[in-house]
Structures are given as C-alpha cells and as structure tokens.
Image: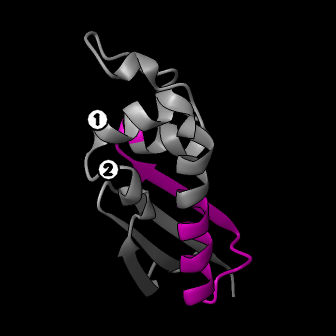
Amino acid sequence: MNYGLAIDIGTTNIKMAKVDMESGSVLDGFSQKNSQKQFGTEVISRIKKSCTGHAGQLAECVRQDILSGMAALNAEKPEQIAITGNTTMVALLCGDDVSGMQEYPFMPQRLQI
C-alpha cells in the first residue's frame, strides 16, 4: 500500500496522519506534545533560545518527535511527507536563523521550502 504522512508542527502539539495515497483516506492518526516545550512554552522563548546557541537542539527535538510519531503509526517509509506549521515552528525544524523573527518587522529567513 502506498501511503503518505501529513504532519502539523504546532507550538504545543505535533499531529500526524497516515494517508492512503490512492484514496486520500486517513488510515491512522497520532498526536503528541512538542518536546521543544522544554525551551519555553511559547514561540518567543524558543526564538530567543535558538538565537543563544540552542538552534540544533530545538531542531532535533522536533525531528525526534516526528520519528517517534512515524514509529507509532508504523510509517517508517512513506511515499510522501507534507509538513506544515507556523513560520517559527517550520524555521526551527529546518535550523534556520530565526533572529529576524524576534522583533519588528518579523522577517523569517525563508517562507517556503
């Protein structure tokens, strides 16, 4: 069976759905707390931590959360993966420089991947 994963990285939770690529039906779902919370419960705290040398740790938290979700869904080899989230969550996942997002005019390093 060909399946894909849809992943939403939220500030509080990471939600995943295993999707049948032919029918589009959701086969299974999984939700867990975003383990980045250890660096702060809101976006600004995480931006500040990232800017003070913790960018790699913040990215690794989400990567490990995604891998554990994939294991829980028995979805280690999806055909496709779609990842979404707010601008900060996606930037932290990618290890982007988020310093431009901590004050006006709030400029991310990139808007699309």
**In percent of the image, x 25 and y 11: which residue is there?**
104
* Rendered view: 49 above or below 70: above
Image side of residue 41 versus residue 96, left or right: left
Magenta-drawn segment: 62-88
* Amino acid type, label 2: Gly
Q: Quadrant of the image for the C terminus?
A: top right
**Label 2 residue SS:** loop
* Rendered view: 105 above or below 52: above
**Label 1 residue SS:** helix
Q: Quadrant of residue 16?
A: bottom left
Label 1, label 2: how far apart the Cα atoms are? 8 Å
Q: Residue 43 at what x, y percent from top left? A: 30, 41
Local packing at callout 2 (Cα closer than 10 Å; few below 14, some 14-19, many 20+) is some
* Residue 17 shown in magenta: no
**Residue under circle 1?**
44
Q: Residue 92 at what x, y percent from top left? A: 50, 41
Question: Among all residues in the image, which is located at the extreme front?
Answer: 52
**Residue under circle 2?**
40
